[in-house]
Amino acid sequence: MKWLPTAVAIGVGLVTLADFFYRHPLLDTIGTAFREWTILLTAFALLLGLFNLLHVHFLRVARRNEPNPGYSLVLLATALAVTGIGFWFGLPSEPMTWIFSNLYLPLQGAFFALVAFFLASAAYRALRANSFATFLMLAAALIVLIGQIPLTSIATQAKDWILSVPSEAGVRGLLLGVALGTLATGVRLLVGIDRPYSE
Amino acid sequence: MSDLIGVWVGAILTLLVFSYLLGDSPLFRIAQAIFVGVAVGYAVNVALYLILLPRLIYPLIDSPQQNWHLFVPLALGILLFAKLRAAWSPLGNISIAFLFGVGGALAIGGALSGAFVPQLNATILSLSPAQNLNSVISNWLLVIGTIGALLSFRFLAQPQRPLARAFETLARGWGGLGRWFILIAFGAIFADTAVARVSVLIDRVYYLLHDWLQIVR
């Protein structure tokens, strides 16, 4: 039965790809169903991943020789409390909105804000590397940063030019490279050369 | 009252996260654990209330004969949980294969229609000197930079034939030039990220000073 996952991946993939490029009522119906099933399966996969995360932290608490089980205990307690409140009151409910606004959003905002300090530290360390490559990168960054401030029209024009010409060219090259890589990986999956599902 | 408690909870959690600026501490670790816990709990509810219940469970309970095709994702979803036990793990491969099959096909379609063709179209520019000087220079730089950035990811051994060797030397030189364009792009992305993060930092500080301490009006 080892061939079954490969057959499923190739069959389902080719039908979805055909639906992407050809308009046919039967292909449309099957393609739409496959995409809908993928959304449902992704939700199941998310639940599986979350269950696994909780299982790992439960084991860390249960085994007495693990270092710092207290953090895992906090994680488990918070996860179970939020899950339980959601099950009891429903997702569009006042308690869940309160949790989202007063727990999730401040924490997410603070973690994102923390990155500002790491970026400043990374820029300082890059300056100390003292090479032409870092100079070029930081010069571009500085011009884009200064151009955001409405001080002089020259700075804004310089920023606009960097974003629309040299930076655009670099990003476009990167995007084309990523697209080619994605195409190659997708084709390898669909012809059965890569089988990550069989591991 | 619940708003006041909410502001206090939010402010304390923000301070716990900012405690990392003084070094890695248990306060920061607690904030990390709470964040992951809340995110897990919220994600479980989103998966259940926004996807599984309205799109799978309710339609199957209401009219199973009309929605018989939904038994397939239900079966595949249950098979996915076989991954939790090593002995049953191969059963879950079918569900994973389904996800990879659809995902691979959509990735090919998306890469072609969403990135490859539009970016290629945007790079087909007039290099004629008949237009104004600014456009000519910008268009030349865009074309040279795009091809150079693409060539900078080309890693091949030095060929033996003279013509191929000449082509390889040209491609390497052009790729080296393309790397400069990539560095400028990274600089611009770095600046944009820094601006976004500093904006969030200002919002957090404003939250502490305005909503919590009420020092700033």
Image (spheres, rainbow, N blue to C red):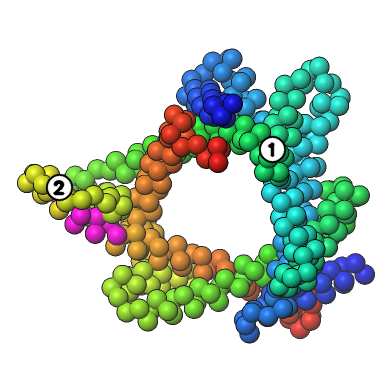
Residue A70, given in percent of the width and then of the height, sits at 78, 71
Residue at 74% x, 35% y is B78
Bounds of the magenta segment? B170-179
What's the magenta bit mostly, secondary-structure-wise? helix
N-terminal label among 1 and 2 = 1
Which residue is tagged 1? Answer: B88
Q: Is residue B106 visible?
A: no
Chain bearing tag 2 is: B
Both labels 1 and 2 in a single chain: yes
Picture layout, residue A130 above or below residue A183: below
Which residue is tagged 2? Answer: B159
Task: Tell which of A47 and B92 is nearer to you.
Answer: B92
Task: Tell which of B42 and B161 is nearer to you.
Answer: B161
Task: Tell which of A73 and A157 is nearer to you.
Answer: A73
Residue at 27% x, 51% y is B155
Nearest to the eye among marks 1 and 2: give it. 1
Residue B70, given in percent of the width and then of the height, sits at 74, 25
Disc 2: CA contacts within 10 A as few (<14), some (14-19) or many (>=20): few
Under tag 1, what secondary structure?
loop
Q: Quadrant of the N terminus of chain B?
A: bottom right
Chain bearing tag 1 is: B
Mark 2 residue type: Pro
Q: Is residue A96 left or right of residue B157?
A: right
Q: Quadrant of residue B180?
A: bottom left
